[in-house]
């Protein structure tokens, strides 16, 4: 049975599709319509060249989503970054989940955050907590990947942090994880299909190294410069755009300013370090 991936414009989504396509079997991707039709068409064309079946539309269109999910075993819902609108994320996640139930899908893989257990007033973490609750209550198997702060080359937050978007000497500490490791874990969550369970499984996933947010920002700047060959702008002390000229949301800044420690049962101690690149 096929697997469907959402969030295929993100680093985690792109890596997951490549891994899934490499192992064989039918892979479907849902490319969302954006304000830049050419960008979406180029993304869809690239996935078609990889042999994927492409659905192109809006993730809040339940009928279209359910049609795209017909005969799908696992839905990898890999969208959702702290730069996103929390209300829109919850709406899209609810639609994907409803479509998966209507189409008879067996399993959902949901991307979340380590700090979701203590959302406080953070609207992004509150949105993730609501999505986790929906997944737990749904009549299908679910695997929630609670990830540490994630980075990758196709990620607005990564770029903004590297460019000094948090200002000089930001507070906080994390165990940052590479998007490719998140994608690998998501693919592994789909691999065991013979298990007949109705379980809701939560997996904590981190990178191998604890870093202060200040050191993380510096390491991301070095890594992105190495990838592109162009140095990023120096720190200005003012929030820089995450994308389209919009400043970093307060929820993203608050999350990155936290000290988020590694749970004892977390995976990822042998994962990819930033010294190995993005």
Image (cartoon, grey):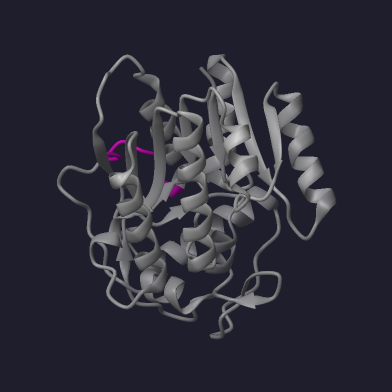
* Residue 255 in view of the camera: yes
Q: Residue at x 39, y 20 (%)?
A: 191
Q: Residue at x 45, y 45 (%)?
A: 178
- In the image, residue 227 above or below residue 139: below
Q: Residue at x 79, y 34 (%)?
A: 45
Give whichever of 230, 178 is nearer the camera.
Answer: 178
**Residue 115 x %, y %:** 29, 62
**Residue 83 x %, y %:** 53, 66
* Residue 277 in view of the camera: no
Q: Is residue 270 magenta?
A: yes
Q: Main secondary structure of the magenta part?
A: loop
Residue lying farthest to the left in this orientation: 264
- In the image, residue 47 above or below residue 34: above
Give whichever of 130, 149 is nearer the camera.
Answer: 130
Q: Residue at x 38, y 59 (%)?
A: 128
Residue lying farthest to the right in this orientation: 38
**Count of marks overlaid on the render:** 0
- In the image, residue 256 above or below residue 220: below
Give whichever of 98, 231 is nearer the camera.
Answer: 98
Q: Tell me the quarter of the picture where residue 181 sits.
A: top left
Q: Is residue 219 left or right of residue 45?
A: left
**First to last magenta residue range:** 267-274
Q: Tell me the quarter of the picture where residue 157 sits.
A: bottom right
**Residue 97 x %, y %:** 45, 44
Q: Is residue 275 left or right of residue 84?
A: left
Q: Tell me the quarter of the picture where residue 114 sits.
A: bottom left
**Residue 246 x %, y %:** 64, 76
Give whichever of 93, 38 is nearer the camera.
Answer: 93
């Amino acid at each position: 049975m096929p697997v469907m991936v959402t969030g295929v414009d993100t680093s985690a989504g792109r890596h997951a599709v490549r891994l899934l396509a490499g192992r064989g079997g039918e892979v479907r991707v849902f490319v969302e319509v954006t304000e830049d039709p050419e960008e979406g068409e180029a993304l869809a064309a690239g996935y078609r060249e990889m042999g994927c079946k492409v659905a192109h539309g809006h993730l809040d269109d339940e009928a279209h989503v359910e049609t795209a999910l017909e005969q799908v075993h696992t839905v990898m819902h890999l969208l959702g970054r702290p730069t996103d609108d929390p209300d829109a994320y919850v709406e899209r996640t609810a639609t994907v989940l409803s479509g998966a139930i209507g189409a008879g899908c067996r399993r959902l893989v949901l991307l979340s955050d380590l700090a979701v257990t203590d959302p406080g007033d953070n609207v992004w973490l509150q949105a993730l907590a609501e999505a986790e609750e929906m997944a737990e209550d749904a009549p299908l198997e679910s695997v929630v990947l609670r990830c540490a702060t994630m980075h990758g080359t196709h990620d607005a937050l990564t770029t903004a942090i590297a460019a000094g978007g948090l200002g000089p000497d930001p507070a906080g500490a994390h165990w940052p994880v590479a998007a490719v490791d998140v994608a690998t874990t998501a693919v592994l969550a789909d691999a065991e299909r013979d298990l007949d369970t109705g379980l809701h499984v939560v997996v904590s996933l981190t990178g191998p190294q604890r870093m202060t947010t200040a050191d993380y920002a510096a390491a991301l700047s070095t890594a992105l410069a190495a990838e592109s060959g162009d140095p990023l702008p120096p720190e200005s002390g003012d929030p820089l755009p995450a994308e389209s000229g919009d400043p970093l949301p307060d929820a993203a800044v608050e999350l990155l300013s936290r000290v988020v420690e590694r749970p004892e049962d977390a995976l990822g101690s042998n994962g990819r370090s930033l010294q190995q690149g993005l």
